[in-house]
Amino acid sequence: MSIFSYNITSNNNTMETIDKENKYVRARERVQELKKFYGNVTSYVFVIAGLAILNYYTTGFGYMWFLWAAFGWGIGIVFHAIKTFDLNPFFGKQWEKRKLEEFMREDEQNNKWK
C-alpha cells in the first residue's frame, strides 16, 4: 500500500512540475511578445521623429511627407497591438479557448450516449 501511495505522490509531483514548466514557457513567450511590441513602438517614435525633423529642415513642413511613413507604420503597430494584447473580439485567444471548451463538451455529451 505504501508503494502505491508513493507512485501516486510521485505522479502528482511530476504533473505539478510539468504544469509549472508549461506556465513558465507560456509566460516567457508572453514576455517576448511584449518586448517585441514595445521595441516596435520605440523604433516608431524615434524614426518618425527623425523623419519629421528631416522633413522640417528640407521643406519647412511645406509638404509633410513624413506623415505617410507615420500612417503606414502606425497601421502596422495597431495590428501588432491587437495581436499582442489579444484585442480581437472575433478570433482572439479567448474565443479560441471558448470554442475548444465548447467542442470538448459536445464530444463528451456525444460519447455518453454511445
Image (spheres, rainbow, N blue to C red):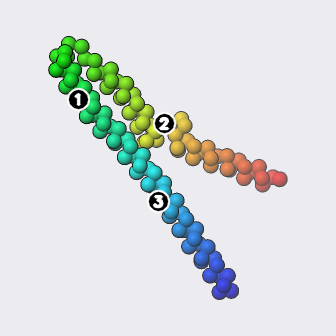
Q: What residue type is labelled 2?
A: Asn
Location of residue 63 in the rendering, given as x and y in whole percent from the top left corner: 24, 13
Location of residue 13 in the rendering, given as x and y in whole percent from the top left corner: 56, 73
Residue at the outermost top position: 62
Q: Which mark is residue 88?
A: 2
How many residues crowd around disc 3 within 10 Å: few (fewer than 14), some, or many (20 or more)?
A: few
Location of residue 91 in the rendering, given as x and y in whole percent from the top left corner: 54, 37
Q: In this view, does 67 lie to the left or right of 3?
A: left
Instruction: Reply above or below: 74 against 15.
Output: above
Q: What residue type is labelled 1?
A: Gly
- Comparing 63 with 13, the one in front is 63
Query: How far apart in space, not on screen, are marks 3 and 2 (Cα)?
Result: 24 Å
Q: Please tell me whether mark 1 or mark 2 is closer to you in this view.
A: 1
Query: How far apart in space, not on screen, are marks 1 and 2 (Cα)?
Result: 32 Å
Q: Please tell me whether mark 3 or mark 2 is closer to you in this view.
A: 3
Q: Which residue is drawn at the image coordinates 39% and 46% (left, top)?
A: 34
Q: Which residue is drawn at the image coordinates 48% and 57% (left, top)?
A: 25
Choose top left, top right, bottom left or bottom right for residue 99: top right
Residue corresponding to mark 3: 24
Residue corresponding to mark 1: 50
Query: How far apart in space, not on screen, are marks 3 and 1 (Cα)?
Result: 39 Å
- Please tell me whether mark 1 sits on a helix, a strand or a loop: helix
Question: In the rendered image, which quarter contains the N terminus?
Answer: bottom right
